[in-house]
Amino acid sequence: MDDYLARGHMSLVPENLAASSGPVSYLPHHGILKGIDADAKYRVVFNGPSCTAARTSLNDALHTGSQSAAGPCRRCDALAAISYVFVADVEKMYRQQLEWDAPLAVEEATIWTNLEEELFLVEQIRIPRWFRGDPASLVEVHGFSDASEQAYAAVVYLRVIEDGRPHISLVMAKTRVAPLKRVSLPCLELCAASLLAKLAEHVCAILSLEASPVFLWTNSTVALSWIRGHPAKWTTFVANRVAEIQRLNRDAKWLHVPGRINPADCASRGVSPRELLEHPLWWGGPGFHSEDPVSWPTDPGLPASADLPERRAAKCLTSCGTREPKELARFSSLRRLLRVSAWIWRWRRRCVKPKDRVEAAPTQPTLLGPEELDFALTRWIRVAQAVTFHAELENIRAGRPVSGRSILRKLTGGRLRKNPASRRTH
């Protein structure tokens, strides 16, 4: 830097410019050291993107991160440049919480070394993009989902039947890392089924297969029972995903497939590049696709609805209060209720006391008297109080104070408060 300053290649920033509040631009530069000689001089490159005669630039040769890190760190950088990446292994690496320069254990280092040695095989993978033959051929959409503690995945195939012979083609697959929050395996299977529902709906829309039959397969009997049930039966986590699955695939048939022949198991649990290159289950789907539908796997005994986890608890509300007499529903006016009740109670008194009936017969008026109407009103007021203030009456009969939440508390102190008498009792 002193040599650059002495030769006039650079100059110091004036103090007035350094103290300026406006924008100030600086030309970035990189220090270059060739070899590992401690006495070697540093060279400065001011224009990093400038290409040399070999069509390479300094920016193309810059390293990312510390170069003293273990080999797997460099392999992770290489994984970002290709379309195939094992997401569960990357998540597991970050869960180990290793320092940047910390060496890996022998077991982990062996795994990453094997992956590095087989990574070149990814370039040999070829995915056919021609799915359909004759336009009159029957096309079926088959999707599979599976989950493990590391990840969950979904894969979609097309089953094209031409001249009576089925042809299976891999169309699309997706993998998601399991959430950091621990959830049960059936819930992860349901997440995989939700991912499959979205994937199948997307494939049908892109390839214009809305009218084609759709078959969606899972190896989880619990998730299958959830999907076939009403969302209101389950807790929020399950209900939201079941509702989404049923909305996206209204006409799809959800079926059960054994785990050993589930192609999505390859993605959820992971396979090496060497195994993936010639994996018959992944590229060709399960073997029963080449057979008649009558020989396809059938549903095993699904668990009963009452035995399923994540079932919403039923809430029962019971009322212990006195029910309103059904006689009140027969009358639309208080006047008619009181008059009918008064006549009934007059007849009841005569039936209970026959002697009084004989003596009172000559003098008994043919019309209802005021005292009889007042008696009927008083009786119905007591009935209304027994229905409305059942708890308060029970407390009074038992010698307990009325609850502080009772509306009768607001009525205390009314007339007594306005009484001019002295509050002193002695």
Image (tube, rainbow, N blue to C red):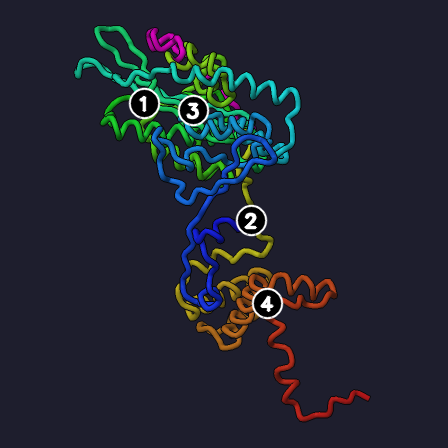
Residue 231 image-quadrant placement: top left
Q: Which residue is mark 2?
A: 317
Instruction: Please tell me whether residue 312 is drawn above or below residue 81 in the rendered image.
Output: below
Q: Position of residue 13 (x, y in %)?
A: 47, 61
Q: CB atoms at circles 4 and 3 under 8 Å apart? A: no
Q: Secondary structure at mark 3?
A: loop
Spatial distance from mark 4 to mark 1, Cα to Cα? 87 Å
Q: Which residue is mark 4?
A: 356
Mark closer to the chain start, 1 or 3: 3
Residue 383 visible here: yes
Q: Which residue is mark 3?
A: 84
Q: How many marks?
A: 4
Q: Residues within 10 Å of mark 3 (few under 14, many from 20)?
A: few
Q: Nearer the viewer, mark 1 or mark 3?
A: 3
Q: Residues within 10 Å of mark 4 (few under 14, many from 20)?
A: few
Q: Position of residue 183 (x, y in %)?
A: 57, 34
Task: Give the amino acid at mark 1.
Answer: Val
Q: CB atoms at circles 4 and 1 under 8 Å apart? A: no
Mark closer to the chain start, 1 or 2: 1
Spatial distance from mark 3 to mark 2, Cα to Cα? 56 Å
Q: Which residues are magenta?
A: 285-307
Q: Position of residue 426 (x, y in %)?
A: 82, 89
Instruction: List the single residue furthest toward the right.
Output: 426
Q: Residue at x 17, y 17 (%)?
A: 135
Q: Which residue is mark 1?
A: 214
Q: Which mark is residue 368?
A: none
Task: Give the amino acid at mark 2.
Answer: Leu
Q: Nearer the viewer, mark 4 or mark 1?
A: 1
As for residue 292 lying within the magenta part, the answer is: yes
Spatial distance from mark 4 to mark 3, Cα to Cα? 104 Å
